[in-house]
Image (tube, rainbow, N blue to C red):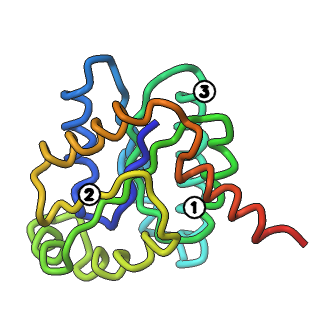
């Protein structure tokens, strides 16, 4: 599984689509926005803030488990996510146990995030820049790409090169993060 993590509007979905076209075998793209789109939005807008936070938490936890299920069934997955809350990474470290995860940091300049967000009608201004510091706080990736300085084709090539040169899951960033997370949780 390739897990693309970055702020909203950083280019994760665009990279995922490019990867699917570039891979020689069938892969699935599973994005957090896709799962959010399955929810009845008109009902979501009627919720109190605490109720909405709980619905969003359950949606994201379900998303993690759906992706893990697809991967555990033997499917190759490109997952795109915004790990802007610590619990999301912690939950993924648990549910992706036994899944070979290539962890990709998707970076983008604040100016580009602001401009991309402005052009999109489904985003709240300032959200992406606010997320950009949070999503990368764990600081450990297998591959990092910057969509402000590289084309989507170059980002895809960089990820595929990593996969080609590192086919064995012996020292993946996700496994090291899992070990760190377990050590932090130990009494």
Does residue 53 appear in this view?
yes
Q: What residue is drawn where x is 53% and y is 62%?
A: 56
Q: Quadrant of the C terminus?
A: bottom right
Q: Nearer the viewer, mark 2 or mark 1?
A: 2
CA separation in Å, label 1 and label 3: 19 Å
* Residue at numbered disc 3: 72
**SS of the residue at dot 3?**
helix
Q: What residue is drawn where x is 52% and y is 31%?
A: 168
Check contact, mark 3 vs mark 2: CB within 8 A. Answer: no
**Would residue 57 be found to the left or right of residue 8 on screen?**
right
Question: Which mark is on residue 88?
Answer: 1
Sort mark 2 into few (<14), some (14-19) or many (20+) by Cα contacts within 10 Å: many
**SS of the residue at dot 1?**
helix
Q: What residue is drawn where x is 28% and y is 52%?
A: 12
* Residue at numbered disc 2: 145
CA separation in Å, label 2 and label 1: 21 Å
Residue 181 horizontal/vertical position (percent): 70, 64
């Amino acid at each position: 599984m390739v897990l693309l993590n970055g702020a909203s509007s950083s280019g994760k979905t665009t990279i995922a689509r490019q990867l699917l076209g570039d891979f020689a075998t069938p892969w699935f793209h599973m994005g957090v926005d896709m799962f959010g789109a399955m929810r009845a939005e008109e009902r979501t807008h009627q919720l109190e803030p605490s109720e909405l936070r709980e619905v969003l938490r359950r949606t994201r936890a379900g998303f993690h488990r759906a992706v893990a299920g697809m991967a555990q069934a033997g499917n190759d997955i490109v997952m795109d996510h915004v790990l802007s809350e610590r619990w999301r990474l912690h939950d993924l470290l648990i549910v992706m146990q036994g899944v070979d995860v290539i962890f990709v940091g998707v970076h983008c300049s604040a100016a580009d995030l602001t401009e991309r967000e402005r052009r999109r009608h489904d985003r709240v201004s300032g959200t992406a820049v606010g997320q950009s510091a949070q999503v990368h706080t764990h600081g450990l990736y297998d591959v990092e790409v910057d969509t402000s300085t590289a084309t989507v084709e170059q980002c895809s090539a960089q990820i595929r090169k990593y996969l080609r040169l590192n086919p064995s899951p012996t020292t993946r960033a996700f496994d090291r993060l899992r070990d760190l997370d377990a050590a932090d949780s130990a009494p």
